Amino acid sequence: MASRPTERRARRGEAREQLTSREPAIWRGNMPASHDGERAAASQVVSRRSFGHWRIFSGLIVASLMLVLALFFSSDAFFIHSIAVGGLRYLTESDIFALSGIANTHVFWVDPQEVRTRILQSPTIANATVNVGWGTPMVQIVVEEREPALVLEQAGIATWIDLQGRVMRQREDRPDLLRVMNDNSLAGVPEGRVDTSMIAGALQLHSLMPELPALRYNLEYGLGYNDARGWEVWFGTGTDMPEKILIYNAIVEDLQRENFVPASVYVIDPDHPYYCCRVVN
């Protein structure tokens, strides 16, 4: 019987030890106590603070970019006021700048392909390369100009003609070029292209008779000139001028043996040459 009071006292001692070893409690009303919840709340506070700092930093970046863009599109330094041009011989830098169509245009809106297309609209330009960068000047263009083959004078206006028959503005006086006078002065200034058979024939005649100062061109009779012996001769067009010259020289020899001076000699068709007599009133 004495052991039961002893057991009770031992149990009361253990209960007291458990009560004294507990940590202080926090009143949470009806919510269960949890140390993990406190840690999560603290981490959320830190995360919100970090997120707020990043939002401020991002806002500063966006504002800086907007400022840079505003300066980029408003600053006069990024507008095209001059260009660098290479490969020029007859044209000038001002000519190319006008053809490019980019004066006072922002560099951001300059399309090199569009600029090249506009420049190639000039019959004087055979090829063009356009580069846009951030150097000075920001637009660099290299052109290849067409070479004139002869000078065609029509309606009192001289124009250059290249080997492909393209009509170009005469940029300077070239005494070394063959001069062709168009008899049809009422036709006006030629535009676009001239028949390439006329170009080829004129250059052949010039190589066979370099002493001739100029040739004539007639829509009906083709190429010809005024012979110093008192008549005119017509050879048509094309690349068979050597054969036509031989036929013409043979006809002239026959006429001179007969002491006959024609008004005109026509070797337009080498198979059917003929000449006309002078009309005597």
Image (tube, helix red, strand yellow):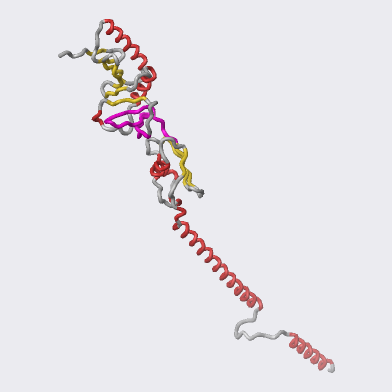
Residue lying at 51% horizontally and 61% vertically, measured from the top left: 65
The extreme right residue here reads 2
Q: Residue at x 25, y 30 (%)?
A: 187
User: How many callouts does the rendering have?
Assistant: 0
Looking at the picture, how far across and down is residue 40, in whole percent?
A: 62, 74
Spot occupied by residue 6 in the image (x, y as percentages of width and height): 83, 92
Front residue of this view, candidates 48 and 1: 48
Residue that lies at the very extreme toward the left in this rendered image: 281
Task: Give whichever of 173, 164 is nearer the camera.
Answer: 173
In the rendered image, residue 22 lying in the magenta stretch gets the answer no
Query: Is 137 located above or below residue 264 in the figure?
Result: below
- The quarter of the image holding the C terminus is top left
Residue at horizontal 27 percent and vertical 15 percent from the top: 266
Q: Quadrant of residue 123?
A: top left
Residue at 35% x, 12% y: name it: 246
Lateral position of residue 60 relative to residue 194, left or right: right
Left or right: where does residue 147 sit relative to residue 189? right
Where in the figure is residue 30, as x and y percent of width and height?
A: 60, 84
Q: In which quarter of the image is the N terminus?
A: bottom right
Residue 13 in which image quadrant: bottom right
Give the answer, above or below, for where 228 lies relative to 30: above
Q: Please provide the residue range marked out in magenta.
A: 144-171
In the displayed structure image, the side of residue 24 where residue 94 appears, left or right:
left
Magenta span has 169?
A: yes
Image vertical order of residue 259 relative to residue 153, above or below: above
61 and 124: which one is in front?
124
Q: Position of residue 77 (x, y in %)?
A: 47, 54
